[in-house]
Amino acid sequence: MTGFHVLTLFPEMIINGLGESITGRSIERGFVGLEAVNIRDYAFNKHHKVDDYIYGGGAGMLMQAEPVYQCFKAVEERIREGGNIKPLRCIYMTPQGRVFNQQIAKELSGEEDIIILCGHYEGIDERVLEEIVTDNISIGDYVLTGGELPAMVLIDAVSRLIPGVLNNEASSDTESFEDGLLEYPQYSRPEVWRGKRVPEVLLSGHHENVEKWRRAQSVIRTRERRPDLLSETGCRCH
Ligand code: 6GU
């Protein structure tokens, strides 16, 4: 079982955001482990303060090193007590990281326990990041207010690759990106909707022709919408 351990100031965001639908069900059924640990619970000072002004000046506040470190150590210790002796990944969600993609999701789906650190405000004191972070991951070139939504994106993408999470075992590898192509268009009942017919080949029952049509549609769609995926550098097929 893959277990995600999210260190955050907003644990309810993580639990509520992933508690529904397919991710929620896979957690309930034990295919995926998820805990969200509140960094504030490890602020062993009078007012449970976790942030402070930034040396050198500038706008905003920074998350202090010590509560993050104490939180990490407590989570690491519990993972070790659970019997995992492998080196642990601690992923810091940051726009300064490697941009997340299906390849990284696949790689992470093989891990037993994954610690994910979410920053908020202007970020986290660099000294604790140097001490605990093994991977910096971004979800794209835009700036968000915190790492919680990116952490949920990563957990969703990794979870659906874990055996048992999708009821249809085949469905994760026929979808977009698994072969470097976008998915073909799909149709359900009725056969005619507002005068628009379902493509005839899909009603033919001829499975080989259906497969050929879908493949061709995937290529057309990728060329139209994401030509970068077909280019020599963007394509992982050759
Ligand atoms: Cl991982 N964090 C934040 N705060 N903003 C982002 C991001 C991560 N990825 C893209 N923008």
Image (tube, grey):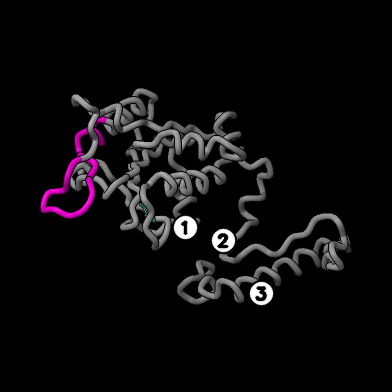
Q: Would you identify the image quadrant in which residue 8 lies?
A: top left
The disc labelled 3 sits on which kind of residue?
Ile
What stretch of residues is rendered in magenta? 52-70
Question: Who is closer to the viewer here, 206 or 128?
Answer: 128
* Residue 219 placement, left or right of 63: right
Mark 2 packing: few (<14 Cα in 10 Å), some, or many (20+)?
some
Q: Residue at x 60, y 66 (%)?
A: 181
Q: Between marks 1 and 3, how big is the CA–CA gap?
A: 22 Å
Question: Who is closer to the viewer here, 154 or 233?
Answer: 154
Mark 3 packing: few (<14 Cα in 10 Å), some, or many (20+)?
some
Callout 2: CB less than 8 Å from ligand 1: no
Q: Give the residue pinned by disc 1.
A: 101
The earlier-in-sequence mark between 1 and 3 is 1
* Dots 1, 3 in contact, CB < 8 A: no
Q: Give the residue pinned by disc 2.
A: 177
The earlier-in-sequence mark between 2 and 1 is 1
213 over 164 or under it: above or below? below
Q: Give the residue pinned by disc 3.
A: 220
* Dots 2, 1 in contact, CB < 8 A: yes
- Secondary structure of the residue carrying numbered label 2: loop
Quarter of the render that holds ligand 1: bottom left
Q: Is residue 132 magenta?
A: no
Q: Residue at x 65, y 56 (%)?
A: 174
